[in-house]
């Protein structure tokens, strides 16, 4: 039994010694140009892609879910754009519209405010 303990200690000692012989990792060179970490900028585009694109599609055409929802308005179509004011788009998002759920709990006012300008950028 004692031999076992001695053997075990010897093995541990050898392992520890082995570890000490590892070459010290070279510290990474400091990168002064690296920007400090900041929260990712929230844009109308990434809010749209997260909250809206699963129904309306990344391009706003709403093709993907036609089977489930029937006709979805093509958000980039000139006639849809002409029909909706920025405030009407914001209201649609806040209150929902027909089969579209309301987003007043999910999105803040700031986030909702960024969506009409993004929808305008989809105009074709
Ligand atoms: C669960 C699916 C779904 C999601 C998510 C969704 N929509 Fe909709 N949206 C619809 C449907 C369905 C309609 C058509 C509503 C109707 O006429 O019954 C619609 C209609 C609209 C309209 C047109 C309203 C009008 O007056 O004609 C706008 C603008 C719109 N959505 C914007 C958005 C935006 C912006 C988001 C993200 C915040 C979003 N939608 C998220 C399903 C969705």
Image: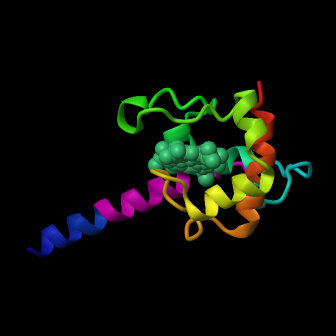
- Left/right placement of residue 70 relative to residue 27 reads left
Q: Residue at x 72, y 43 (%)?
A: 45
Q: Quadrant of the C terminus?
A: top right
Rendered location of residue 81, percent (x, y): 75, 37
Figure quadrant of the N terminus: bottom left
- Name the residue furthest left: 1
In the displayed structure image, the side of residue 5 where residue 108 appears, left or right: right
Residue 82 to residue 112: above or below:
above
The residue shown at (58%, 35%) is: 73
Q: Nearest the camera: 59 or 3?
A: 59
User: In percent of the image, x 50 and y 26: which residue is there?
Assistant: 63
Hey, which residue is sitting farthest bottom in the picture? 2
- Magenta highlight on residue 107: no
Which is nearer the eye, 38 or 78? 78
- Residue 100: percent from left, percent from top: 50, 52
In terms of image quadrants, where is residue 9? bottom left
Q: Can you say whether 117 is above or below 6 in the image?
A: above
Outermost residue, top side:
124
Question: Is residue 16 visible to the viewer in this orientation of the structure?
Answer: yes
- Residue sitting at x 43%, y 62%: 16
Question: Seen in the image, is 96 located left or right of residue 45?
Answer: left
The main secondary structure of the magenta stretch is: helix
Question: x, y (%) of residue 121?
Answer: 80, 35
Measured along the vertical axis of the image, is residue 13 above or below residue 76? below
Residue situated in front as seen by the camera: 45 or 62: 62
The colour scheme of the drawn protein is rainbow
Where does the magenta region start and end? Answer: 11-28
Position above or below: 104 against 32: below
Residue 28 visible in the picture: no
Q: Position of residue 51 (x, y in %)?
A: 57, 51
């Amino acid at each position: 039994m004692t031999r076992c303990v001695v053997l075990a200690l010897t093995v541990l000692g050898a392992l520890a010694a082995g570890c000490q012989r590892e070459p010290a990792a070279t510290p990474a060179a400091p990168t002064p140009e690296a920007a400090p970490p900041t929260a990712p900028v929230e844009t109308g585009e990434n809010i749209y892609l997260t909250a809206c694109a699963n129904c309306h599609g990344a391009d706003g055409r709403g093709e993907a879910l036609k089977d489930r929802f029937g006709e979805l308005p093509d958000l980039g179509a000139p006639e849809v754009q002409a029909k909706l004011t920025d405030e009407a788009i914001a209201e649609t998002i806040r209150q929902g519209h027909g089969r579209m759920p309301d987003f007043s709990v999910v999105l803040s006012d700031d986030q909702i405010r960024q969506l009409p300008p993004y929808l305008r950028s989809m105009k074709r």
